[in-house]
Image (cartoon, rainbow, N blue to C red):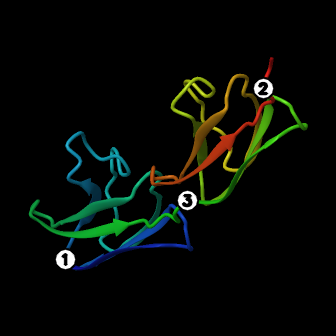
Amino acid sequence: MINSFAAWSIEKDSDIHKFKWSSENAEYCKISDYGKGGGSLYFPNEKTRKPSGSVNKKLTGLITGEFRIRCYNSVGSYDEAFVTVRIDRPEAVINSFTVNPVRPESDIYRFKWLSTNSKYCVISDRGNFFPNEKQRKPSGSVNKKLTGLRLGTFYLACYNETGIYDQASVTVRIDRPETQ
């Protein structure tokens, strides 16, 4: 009854996929996300569709998913087919991560980073200078007062849309004159 069922991205790095099917001797067809215990996420309340056709669907957040089509005949029997969709997201890449004093002999340091294919970045030091660090833009800078630090390592993690990340670190050594 089902001749074909396929899905593909309509353009490079797009969340929008075209689902196309053809069947014979069917009255109507229905598409759903297969294997989603809580119901269909991308085809909720799916309406009946023509025995052959296509539909574009935005698959935001999907990494890999299986979709099912069922095509029903006039007595209620159906045939089904499956297609697996995998969306490859570009990996996050940290191009640079630097820390430099804003002025000579200053306790204020500028943390500067540049990344590509990142949704957000997080700076941490596993210490006191970046507690409860928030998400930051994929590229940017922030000034931070490093009073009392002599030697410390700071980490930058930049995440892509699927949570896969790249990490970099920089060690800061602050030579302070000895006080007498």
Label 1 to label 2, Cα distance in Å? 89 Å
Residue found at x 22% / y 69%: 82
Task: Give the residue pinned by disc 1.
Answer: 25
Q: Where's the C terminus, which quadrant?
A: top right
Three-letter amino acid code at the position of disc 2: Glu
Residue visible at 55% across and 59% down?
92
Q: Where does the image place residue 170, in percent across and percent down from the top left?
A: 63, 48
Whichever of labels 1 and 3 marks the residue nearer the N terminus, that label is 1
Q: What number is the disc on residue 178?
A: 2
The answer to which quarter of the image holds residue 131 is top right
| Residue indicated by mark 3 | 92
Mark 1 → mark 3, Cα distance in angstroms: 48 Å
Depth order, front residue of 84/103: 103
Mark 1 and mark 3 residues within 8 Å of each other at the beta carbon: no
Which residue is situated farthest in the bottom direction here? 3
- SS under mark 1: loop
Left or right: 168 as drawn, with respect to 58 = right
